[in-house]
Amino acid sequence: DGDGAQLMNARHKPCANTGWRRFARPAQVHGFTLIEVLVAVLVLSIGFLGMAGLQVRALSSNNSAAARSMATIDSYSVLEAMRADLANARAGSYNQTVQADACPSDRSSLAAAQLAQWCAQLGADFGRFASTTGVVECDASGSGYCTVTIRFDDTRAGAAGSAARSFQTRVVL
């Protein structure tokens, strides 16, 4: 079989440096080896893990930003209620600390009712925990300077964020 001998001789080529013969790949063989496929899968897997990590980080940052936005809305909510009841706000009727797990039940005055409603709103937005608090402090001199501080647990921020977050708004009524 003369064709087989020619094919066999075409596959073996002498190597100039070592004298060993090596096999040449025939022209009709195409494709990838198993090792090439495994390396490609490994590289893709590392890339996908990186993308998953970025996605988790983005979601936790987004949740934390949403919580800070809710703190802004909640602080302006009580400030608008105080502006509607300006005489009592300047007199110090709103100067209280409310805790979301124990909202005040006293609704005998407009200020007390507004603070009870605000406390319930804080609890709905940040969870009814002892760590969720709202503090209203207005200057006793009647100057109209008021500070609203909201404290909440921001474990949604992940490893980069602090669990205890404080948000403060200072305005002149």
Image: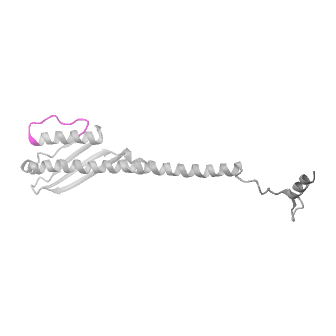
Does residue 104 sit above or below 50 in this rendering? above
Q: Main secondary structure of the magenta part?
A: loop
Q: How many marks?
A: 0
Residue 162 visible in the shown view:
yes
Snapshot quadrant of residue 15? bottom right
Q: Residue at horizontal 45%, vertical 48%?
A: 56
Identify which residue is drawn at 25% across, 51% down: 72
Q: Position of residue 138 (x, y in %)?
A: 15, 51
Tell me: 159 left or right of 165: right
Residue located 49% across and 49% down the image: 53
Q: Quadrant of residue 142?
A: bottom left
Give whichever of 152, 63 is nearer the camera.
63
Is residue 131 visible in the rendered image? The answer is no
Instruction: Give the residue furthest to the right.
Output: 1
Q: Residue furthest bottom?
A: 16
Residue 60, magenta (yes or no): no
Q: Nearer the viewer, residue 119 or 7?
A: 7
The magenta region covers: 99-110
Residue 39: x %, y % from top left = 65, 51
Image location (x, y in percent) of residue 41 = 62, 49
